[in-house]
Image (spheres, rainbow, N blue to C red):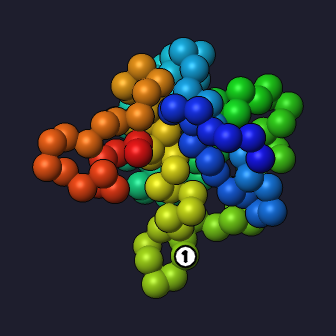
Amino acid sequence: MPELTAGEVELRLGDVTHVLRPTLRAALDLSRRFEGFHHAEVLLVSREIDAYVAVIMAGLGLPADKRMEIERSVYEAGLIAPPRDHNPELLDPLVAFLSILQNGGRPIEPQEGEDPGEAKGA
């Protein structure tokens, strides 16, 4: 696996690790599809499978003919991971990726005095 550059986010689906890349195209596609990033995040937290698939497809820059493959991978990974109400291996990287897109493709830097692990998109 190549080393990640600033703004890229790793996402594991099954046995495959993918790299979501923040691009202007991904930002525009997702913002337009969901009428803003906030709505995309709300749908992710609501465990809307189409939102998961759309964010992954945009981050990977995949064409529409790969959608079924990503849908199957997301379904098999599961949207919940008991005892939690969501699967952090899927949700956390996708929310971080949306934050990075909103910051021009750059990770969100922690504020002075903030724990670096608490910064969104870090």
Q: Position of residue 29 (x, y in %)?
A: 56, 21
Left or right of 91, for residue 11: right
Please state which of residues 34 and 57 is positioned toward the viewer in this rendering: 57
Q: Position of residue 49 (x, y in %)?
A: 60, 52
Residue found at the very far bottom of the displayed protein:
83
Identify the residue at the far left of this view: 113
Q: Of 122 and 96, which appears nearest the observer? A: 122
Residue in view at x 77 percent, y 63 percent: 14
**Is disc 1 surrounded by few (<14), some (14 to 19) or many (20+) residues within 10 Å?**
few
Query: Picture coordinates of residue 108 (x, y %)?
Result: 34, 36
**Where is residue 61, by image quadrant?**
top right
Residue under pointer 1: 81
Q: Is residue 10 left or right of residue 121?
A: right
Query: Is residue 12 in sight in this rendering?
Result: yes
The answer to whether residue 64 is left or right of residue 49 is right
Compared to 39, does 47 lie above or below? Answer: below
Q: Residue at x 53, y 67 (%)?
A: 87
